[in-house]
Image: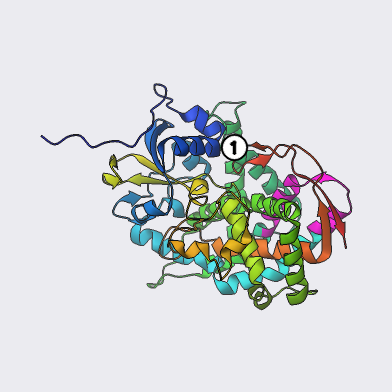
Amino acid sequence: MAEPAKLPPGSSGLPFVGETLPFISDMFGFIRARTERHGPVFRSHILGHPTAFISGPEVCEAWLDENKIQRAGSFPAPVQQLFAGPGILPLLDGAEHRQRKALLMAAFDREAVAGYLSPLQRIIESALARWASGGERPLLPELKRLAIEGICDNVLGMEPGPPLARLVADYEVLFKGFTGLPLNLPGMSFHAALKARDRILAQLAGQVRRHQEGAFDDGLSRVLAARTADGKAMLPEDVTKEMHHVVLAGVVVFAELGAMLLELFRHPAVREKLVAEVKTAAPAGPVTPVQLRQMPYLGQVVMEVKRTCPNVPVIFGRARVPIRIGDATIPAGWNVMMALGAHNLNRIFTEPEKFDPDRFSEVRAEQNRHPYAFAPQGAGSVLGGHKCAGTDYSTVFMQLFAVLLARGYTWEVPPQDLSMNRALVPPEFKSGLRVVIRKV
């Protein structure tokens, strides 16, 4: 008689609730502590379901194998509710996923992203000028506003005004629902988040209708015009949900903008090298895609910020079949969470906790030590796999922010509490990241 398969190390926690409470109170800390204790594969019980956490390049082949991992049904029910249901890109598999991805990529291909540069530069320059006129201020709320304004202008064709202000406010409410107790009761953050979700979807549906009736030049218009090989378009209701998914996924770039500003302040040599490159390649005027490609050190800084910034703690999957990793087996039907933050701090990188953009230089190229060493927005390819559709867009957003900041401003980060509230996703500095920005 065969022996039962050995489960990954770990604990199921308390009856019914498992380890849900410590997980949602500090997802990054929860994963880090258990990875240090058990290794890159461990088990737990989260939101009523047995769950395996995995991280590191060695597990990526299994993670990307659609015969082993499915995305359908992988979101915990509360997360799926906040994302507006099961029919969105991160929860599709196989041909359906690839078809939807190709349509959505109409908003994020090279031509589209290049077209976003000019309006995005205007938005960032306006924000920087506003911040430079106000003395010391907590910058995280401003960075959230910047992220949403940039995405909503580029992708949704929404300019600053009351409708955008309402959308920003509702997303603030909705984000709190991801880390509160998932109880749909009046007075609870999750209940308020669901109400905000409904208002957001109504507003986005109206934006889709306006695009169907008029001429626009933005990401949404590109998605509505996109067709599959057999001539099919995405249904308007699916476009609405995907625009919600895009904003939810994209807004987290605010954490990377804040991390970039802080790390450049903490590392003067990095900042000086970046400023010199920017002032040589793009000293003034509109920033072009060609200029961005002519600044390799800028690319290295952005990659290192993406690698080290605590952003999205996990991405979701579910085991289709028993999955053997090492000497342990993840049973079929278990939820599988790819611990993205832990993954990018793996030991393939030299001193992985250290902020060091030179690790991505041509000489060192540490990201090439393993095909899956660097996976800041998911592993694998964008078109054929489950890497975030907005990977290139977020990179350009960060590059443009860094160029405009470096060539036109100086900044200081006064002494403050830079510990993080890890009950939030992404985690936020408890001080709000107070910064003094001055125009050069």
| Image: 376 above or below 17 | below
Which residue carries the number 1 mark? 193
Q: Is residue 205 visible?
A: no
Does residue 27 appear to the left or right of 39 in the view shown? right
Left or right relative to 355: residue 233 = left
Q: Residue at x 73, y 45 (%)?
A: 141
Most common SS among magenta residues:
helix
User: Against 4, is 171 above or below?
Assistant: below
Magenta-tinted stretch:
127-150
Tell me the amino acid under the disc marked 1: Ala
Quarter in which the N terminus is drawn: top left
Q: Residue at x 33, y 37 (%)?
A: 8
Q: Residue sitting at 73 percent across and 66 percent down? A: 273
* Residue 114 in the image, given as x and y percentages of width and height: 63, 73
130 falls in the magenta region: yes
Percent of width and height locating residue 414: 82, 44
Task: Out of 151 and 435, give the one closest to the viewer.
Answer: 435
Please indicate, yes or no, whether residue 66 appears anywhere in the rendered image.
Answer: yes
> Looking at this view, is 188 or 32 the one in front?
32
Residue 217 lies, with reference to residue 356, above or below; the image says below
Residue furthest to the top in view is 15
The image quarter in which residue 208 lies: bottom right
User: With respect to residue 54, does 273 lie above or below?
Assistant: below
On the image, the x and y values in percent for residue 264 come to: 73, 56
